[in-house]
Amino acid sequence: MDVQKLRADLPFGIQVSSLRPDDLQSGEIARELRDLWVQHGLIVFRDIDEAPEFQIELSRCFGPLEPHPVQELWVAGFPELISLASRPESGNLFEIDGQRVANWIPWHSDLAFVPRINRGGLLRVTQKTSWGGETCFSDQIDAYARLPQRLKERVEDLEILYQLKILDTTRYAKRHHVELLRASATLQALKSRVDTDFPPVAHPAVYVQKETGRKVLNISPLFAEGIVGMDREEGGALLDELVDHIDSCPSYRHAWGDREMVLWDNWRMLHAVTGGPVDEVRIMRRTTIGGDYGLGRALTYADAV
């Protein structure tokens, strides 16, 4: 395999080319890949086998896999692999800055709205759209390093309050004037449970990556609603400042090609999806790498901002 920087001006990310199925039988290569992942946070695999068996075996180099709880998403015969599809007749539709788009998802860490956060994911496209639908990544180790000293001191011992909400009702969406025009069946089903089944949670605003000792600015803009222990106005202002800082940091936008997979560390990388055409199909396949960094905690509804 060939290992290169993902982009000369990025402080994170690498690309690995020409990795073959037989390579995964080598414990040495698996350890090298995991070390690269811990160090760089994001790996773009190019010129690789697109078989589902390869995606699953490659994912296992980085940790145990978690089957998705919704079996309807499973790829037939592969419970570790899910298919995520958006179609013209279904899926979420948004209006953002006057443009109608499908598939838009803002910056987030997976499962920030529950105490237990999975370690990562490995994603590939099986059907892409003619434009948009790019997957974007931003590194929160780099984001912490770029924080002004006054903010580093202010957020050191704080916790961020998260709560699952329908996308256009989140604090982030309201700031960016996002309107949900049509909700998918999954989102519609969630509406009846959001206020009863998903109490708020807290995650530290900063934590230390165990393997390297580097500090991580641990903020997921989507579903972040305030600062634990601060009133709405003060906590909201600080949260907005931190999210604006994240928006200003370098990011990588992946325009999907053939024979590619992208792996990210969900404990330090934010990801997002740019909106795409409302009249085209987009299909992705993904594995989920399990684990928990062990720092989230459940709150009660009375704790919500």
Image (cartoon, rainbow, N blue to C red):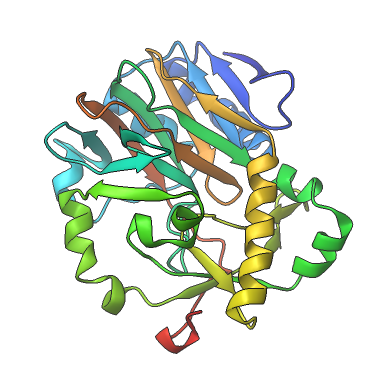
> Percent x, y for residue 18?
50, 10
- 54 in relation to 150, above or below: above
Residue at the image position 33 percent from the left and 28 percent from the top: 276
Quadrant where the N terminus sits is top right
- 28 in relation to 239, above or below: above
Residue 221 position by quadrant: bottom right
Residue at the image position 63 percent from the left and 83 percent from the top: 229
Asked if residue 210 can be seen in this view, the reply is: no
- 252 in relation to 194, above or below: above
Residue at the image position 84 percent from the left and 66 percent from the top: 153
Residue 242 position by quadrant: bottom right
> Percent x, y for residue 262?
47, 28
Judged left or right of residue 77, residue 93 is right
Judged left or right of residue 57, residue 203 is right
Between 247 and 201, the one lying in front of the other is 247
Judged left or right of residue 8, residue 268 is left
> Percent x, y for residue 226?
57, 71
